[in-house]
Amino acid sequence: MFEFVRTHQRLMQFLLLLLIIPSFALVGLQSYSSFGDGANTVAKVAGQPITQQELDGALREQMERLRQAYGDRFDPKMMETPEAKQGVLDNLISQRVLASAVTSEHLAVSDQSLQQTIMGVPALLGADGKFDNDRYHALLAAQGMTPTMYEARLRQDMAMQQLNGAVQTTAFTPKTVATRLSDINDQEREVQELLFKSADYASQVKVTDAMLQDYYAKNPKEFEIPEQIKADYVVLDSAAAASQITVSDADIKTYYDQNVARFTTPEERRASHILISVKKDAPAAEQATAKAKAESLLAEVRKTPADFAKIAKANSQDTASAEMGGDLGYFGAGSMVKPFEDAANKLKQGEISDLVQSDFGYHIIELTGIKPAQVKPLDEVKTDIAAEIKKQLAARKFTELAEAFSNTVYEQADSLKAVADKLHLQIQTAANLGRQPNPAAAPTVPYNNQKFLTALYADEALKNKHNTEAIEIAPNTFIAGHVVEYKPVTKRSFDEVKAIISDKVTRTEEAALAKKAGEEKLVALKAQDNAGGFAAVQTVSRTKNQGVNPLAFEAVMKADVNKLPAYVGVVLPLQGYGLYRIGKVGQPATQDAARRTAEQQQITGILAQQEMLAYVDVLKEKAKVKILKPIVVAPANGDDK
């Protein structure tokens, strides 16, 4: 049932450590039905709405995943295309219909399987090789999650993987198909090359001034100097707002006193247990048998408390903790089921409980450790508190400044000096700005933004010499600009580019002569085979093509080899024209069995994905999916002014 979890353990570990949960889990199945129907609905699945808020949330989650994956190379524009947004919506719909299928198929994940999955993550093991409960809780706390929240989401994810695995395992690749594809991939061709180099025809080229003038006239775009703008700009961001905030010691003390619970580490207890499993609704006889066995073990551990771990390892039916002598590690309030937690809280260190019955069966609990609650002193957290206060105040300050920023650049549109003086911002200058972002510039450069450049080239800024409006180029980052200088499109003079044109025309003529000679030779060879002049034989295949020009390799592998020798010609840019003689076609003397097995698995994997996509399409059809708000291209900033 959990083949996916077993065979994709590293993926499960990655998901746990990064806490990247599928977007359906972030919203929760129950909450899907809580949103209203109407103008806010972008799609319907089985009559249930997918709201704009859900889509926006999924877009933010995908944006964050890409940010983590690409780091500094991440460009927010990746998610601004209609295709990207449509992909996220399609994914939401697929997740919804799959979640519904999980429920209808009654797929479930047992507590034991869930626990084994979590406890099997190497990053959560301590130096002794045992599961580190403290580290687990710390990871979750850092993401603002409790074990209950995370485990519910992981359980849902694992159930989805059950369904995914069940569908994909129906795919298979016939051996004859896999063999045929591998044979094509392994096929070897013995090839000889005859190269007609462009440079060899230089002496035959006669370039006239008329030819140069003709090239100049027919290719004006090559010699254009694009229009450019030089502009002043000011940026308002969180750092600018934070620079205007001062936090006093009195503020820090007040915050500490009012939030002392935040700086308190709650009491944690460590316990070991012996579990005799039995369901609460089991027949009376079955419950009595389990209870009798538990009472017998309780008497045994009370007689020899030092042997608790040994007895737990031999008898506890909680297999995960039994391996560790029943040890459950340290846990805080809310981490254990209520009867168990209540009993553990009443024990003193070293004490053993009476029998405790829960939904899982009968527990015998030994309290092995207590970490009392601790309050961090003010001096220890003073720096963190100051940063937190500054962050909160800066957020409020930024809201105030953003409104003033927007109003000032609009109301005093003849210059940026007013807004810079009022908000204590620095006026900066950027030159050589085109209509499109410069791909060579870092994405984080504020003025290298399409919305901002579009605003600079708008009539209001370019012709009327007014400030641009305040433009949000990133979260909590606004920019406004003022055109200082505009240079229209110009064309370089003929004399300025004559040498460049001469070189291009010469190379073009040389290449044309090389091609003509090569094509004439190709016709002759197809009429009468002649290997004279060709280079030494080289064996190439799709798995062995090092040192072969990619264009030549593609032509050779596409060539019709029903009749040998076969000839093919191809233009080789910057080189000339290549002729290739294919004299023999065959299979390698020895086959790479491991690679062929891997290829068959890859083919099966592709087919499995197609099976899953087809299954999802069927589910969508059954669910009568309706897109109420098709994804459209958003209007450019300022178009609706």
Image (tube, rainbow, N blue to C red):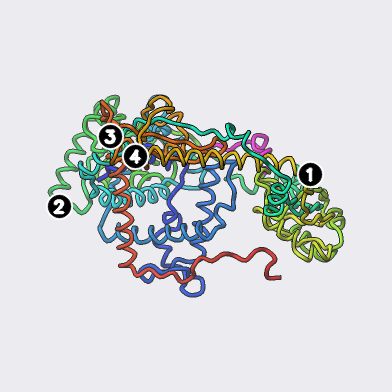
Q: Earlier in the sequence, mark 2 or mark 1?
A: 2
Q: Quadrant of the C terminus?
A: bottom right
The magenta region covers 373-387
Disc 3 from disc 4: Cα separation: 22 Å
Q: Is residue 81 visible?
A: yes
Does the magenta run of residues contain 377?
A: yes
Q: Earlier in the sequence, mark 3 or mark 1?
A: 1
Disc 3 from disc 1: Cα separation: 59 Å
Q: Tag 1: residue type?
A: Glu
Q: Residue at x 42, y 64 (%)?
A: 32
For label 4, count other residues whose C-alpha is less than 10 Å away and answer few (under 14), some (14-19) or many (20+): few
Q: Determine which of the numbered discs, if any, sits on residue 8 in the image.
A: 4
Disc 4 from disc 2: Cα separation: 39 Å
Image spot of residue 129 (x, y percent): 37, 26
SS type, badge 4: loop
Does the magenta run of residues contain 42?
A: no
Q: Determine which of the numbered discs, if any, sits on residue 496 in the image.
A: 1
Of circles 2 and 1, the one toward us is 1
Disc 3 from disc 2: Cα separation: 55 Å
Q: Main secondary structure of the magenta part?
A: helix
Identify the residue under disc 3.
596
Q: Determine which of the numbered discs, if any, sits on residue 283 in the image.
A: 2
Q: Is residue 555 visible?
A: no
> Seen in the image, is 247 located left or right of residue 161?
right
SS type, badge 3: helix
Disc 4 from disc 1: Cα separation: 63 Å
* Dots 3, 2 in contact, CB < 8 A: no
Q: Earlier in the sequence, mark 3 or mark 2?
A: 2
Q: Tag 3: residue type?
A: Arg
Q: Earlier in the sequence, mark 4 or mark 1?
A: 4
Image spot of residue 84 (x, y percent): 50, 56
Residue, far bottom: 38
